[in-house]
Image (tube, rainbow, N blue to C red):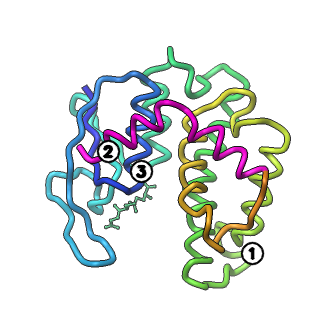
Amino acid sequence: MITLYHRPNTRSTRFIFLLEELGAPYTLHLVTTRTREGGAPDPANPHPHGKVPAIADDGVVVFESAAIALYLTDRFPEQRLGPVVGEPERGAYLSWLAYYAGILEPAVMSKFMSWEVPRGTAGWVPVEEAMAAVIARLTQVPYLAGERFSAADILYATSFALFAKSPLLPASPVIEDYVKRVVSRPAFARAMQKQNG
Ligand SMILES: N[C@@H](CCC(=O)N[C@@H](CS)C(=O)NCC(=O)O)C(=O)O
């Protein structure tokens, strides 16, 4: 049984989406976190900074979105939501999962905070350059790992959906179509219904 440490309307909601896609047995453990308005981390949350998401799988703790996505798709391979070791698409899958945490999120936050990204020293790039790479990929193939939907798409498309009307991300019909493809999945609707616990 998987326990998802979760606060509604946060990055942990996308893991209800993934768990629903996987048909995995799970329970939600609602926790508090810091927010822009205040709030405090919940001591029950195993994430080292009290952030969500985190999961526990019969005592095995995993935190950070990219790691949780990989752990869960490896743990439930029969649903084919992440290419496994030996499949050629595994390379793209791992790369785009790591890119999400290491480049896309810092790029979006840099723009949000109006930080100039120091070229040549920062490990990430300005958001316009990151989005150009994502758009180039999604122009070649329908999903980040290739022809098949994967957990990487849950991370990216739910983020893009959140920023759909914001000037943080450049407008792109490629991204709009991609978001539609992902959020029209029935598991997304189930996640939205279940996310309040
Ligand atoms: N790098 C983390 C980010 C998680 C994160 O920042 N989650 C927010 C909610 S969307 C949170 O828990 N914030 C509380 C805090 O920063 O203390 C991941 O990708 O899983």
Give the percent coordinates (x, y) of residue 94: 62, 39
- C-alpha gap between disc 1 and disc 3: 26 Å
Identify which residue is drawn at 80% across, 36% down: 141
Q: Is residue 36 above or below residue 151?
A: below
Nearer the N terminus, badge 2 or badge 1?
1
Determine which residue is flagged by label 1.
Answer: 120
Query: Quadrant where the C terminus lies?
Result: top left
| Circle 1 Cα neighbour tier, 10 Å, few/some/many (<14 / 14–19 / ≥20) | few
Proximity of marks 2 and 1: CB atoms separated by less than 8 Å: no
Left-right relation of 136 to 6: right
Percent of width and height locating residue 28: 24, 40
Please tell me which residue lies in front, 190 or 58: 190
Q: Amino acid at mark 3?
A: Glu
Identify which amino acid the numbered label 1 is placed on. Answer: Gly
Q: Is 119 or 109 nearer to us in this picture?
A: 109
Disc 3/disc 2 C-alpha distance (Å): 19 Å
Where ligand 1 lies, by image quadrant?
bottom left
Q: Which mark is residue 195?
A: 2
The residue at the far left in this view is 43
User: Does residue 121 appear to the left or right of 66 in the view shown?
Assistant: right
First to last magenta residue range: 174-197
Q: Which mark is residue 64?
A: 3
Q: Quadrant of the N terminus?
A: top left
